Amino acid sequence: MLGTYFTFPELLLWIPIIFGLIVFFLRNEKTARTVAMVSALLTLAVSITSLFYSDVAHHQEYFLYNNVSYVWLPYLGSTFYVGLDGMGYILTLLTAVAYPIILLSSKFPVQKANVF
């Protein structure tokens, strides 16, 4: 975290991880699907919101919103860096759009066709 706010890459990483752990420990399938859908829609909202903060050329402060760096192993000088750039925006948006569709389509059972 670069300041007193959460950056978009942090939210795009931590929302699925935290909600995934919550879903893992839920026993009721309907509740698990609901929590998973909330997580997918929240991730989609963050991904769409990040598109409005992508013009780094005209607004230099947007760079801080789209990049995060953690000191991982300070004695080795190792850091963990994640940032969103032009292709990253598109790929996160496509992934965020795909997950609600996948969750909706997995709700219905697969029906086998009787051929022959």
Image (cartoon, rainbow, N blue to C red):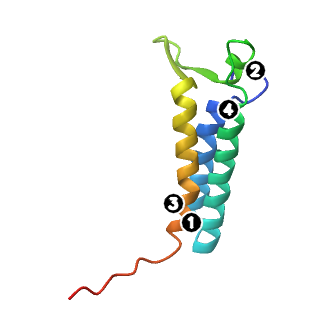
Q: Give the residue at mark 2.
A: 3
Choose mark 4 or mark 2, whichever is in front.
4
Indicate which disc, 2 or 3, sits on the residue closer to the N terminus: 2
Q: Quarter of the image containing the C terminus?
A: bottom left
Q: Give the residue at mark 1.
A: 104
Cα–Cα span, label 1 and label 2: 37 Å
Q: Residues within 10 Å of mark 4 (few under 14, many from 20)?
A: some
Q: Are marks 4 and 2 in contact (CB under 8 Å)?
A: no
Cα–Cα span, label 4 and label 1: 25 Å
Residue 44 in view: yes
**Going 67% across and 32% down the picture, which residue do you hit?**
51
Cα–Cα span, label 3 and label 1: 5 Å
**Going 62% across and 40% down the picture, which residue do you hit?**
14
Choose mark 1 or mark 2, whichever is in front.
1
Q: Give the residue at mark 4.
A: 51
Q: In the rendered structure, which amino acid carries the disc numbered 2?
A: Gly
Q: Residues within 10 Å of mark 1 (few under 14, many from 20)?
A: few
Residue 102 - label:
3
Indicate which disc, 1 or 2, sits on the residue closer to the N terminus: 2
Choose mark 2 or mark 3, whichever is in front.
3
